[in-house]
Image (spheres, grey):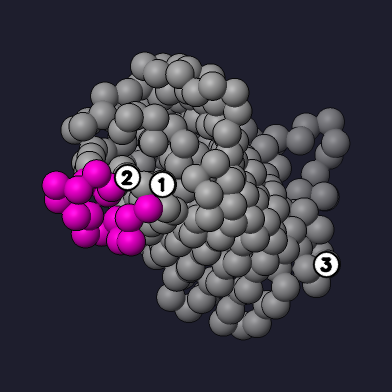
Amino acid sequence: MARFMVAKEGGHRICGLLAAAAVALFASTAQAQLSSTSLLSGSNPYPGFFDIAYPGRFSLTLYGGGFISDQYGTTQEGVQAEQSLTRYVGIVARATGYQLYMGSGFANPLSPNPGSQSGSSRYNFGRFQGGVDFAVTPTTHVYVLGGDDGGDSHNANIEGDISSWLLVHSQHPVNFLVSSVYSWQNDISASSIDLRMVVMSTENYLLMAGGGGAIYGSGFISGVAGQGGPDLGIYFRPWQLGLDAQGGYGTPHGYGQLTLYKQFSWAE
């Protein structure tokens, strides 16, 4: 059951993390990179593909959050590190700790009632992944990751994530996020999608709104399941600090999800 819950919520949580990376990318470099790229010859869209990036960049993102419904709850916390290799390729490492609270109709997954039939089961495990970040265009990044779980879950997985900015020269750029995870041990696939627009941008803040959801199936899941609802995000530029929230309805009935992240980056 623990592996099943990771497959369901893992991809959607990663979307929140990728939104953080996309916001930071857009806020600092997207338009400048797009302008410079337009001057390059169309015959070679990736000049200097194998040249080592100089200056290089190392980034670190700390994140945490939770998911709550009347069927189950999760909390998670973790760290992602990325080191640029060239202008187009970086290596990524990610480690996340999960706490899963199984039950039905419990009031608070953080303190389930021991001995009851609802909310009494708790699982603790970590997911460790590594992979590559490809900058397909200056405003589109593709992440390919793979890894395994430890603790109450042992489950090899492979994940693909896409983060893309559209209409970057307009007053309301749009961020498109897609994440897909496949888990070998239980043969379950999970995918999530988010589409959000910058509704307000100031020197210090970005405010985003939109919608998204997740869908999952295969393995021992009969048919297809999922959930979805509106998204809201805010990013504070001076502190590189962001907050993403989503609420909605689906297979777990009504639900709410919250992700908080803090970024650090250094030029080398």
Q: Amino acid at mark 1?
A: Gln
* Magenta stretch prevailing secondary structure: loop
Q: Amino acid at mark 2?
A: Gly
- Tell me the residue that label 1 is attached to: 71
In percent of width and height, residue 18 lies at 53, 50
Could you tell me which secondary element the residue under label 2 belongs to? loop
Identify the mark nearer the N-term, 2 or 1.
Answer: 1
Q: Is residue 60 visible?
A: no
Image point (59%, 56%), residue name: 248
Q: Is residue 208 visible?
A: yes
In percent of width and height, residue 213 lies at 61, 47
- Tell me the residue that label 3 is attached to: 170
- Rounded to the nearest whole Å, what is the CA distance between mark 3 and mark 1? 41 Å
Viewer-nearest residue: 187 or 195: 187
Image point (33%, 55%), residue name: 106
Could you tell me which secondary element the residue under label 3 belongs to? loop
Identify the mark nearer the N-term, 2 or 3.
Answer: 2
**Contact (Cβ within 8 Å) of mark 2 with mark 3:** no
Label 3 neighbourhood size at 10 Å, few (<14), some (14-19), many (20+)?
few
- The label shown at residue 163 is none
Q: Amino acid at mark 3?
A: Ser
Image point (63%, 73%), residue name: 207
In percent of width and height, residue 91 lies at 43, 37
- Tell me the residue that label 2 is attached to: 103
| 31 to 91, vertically: above or below | below
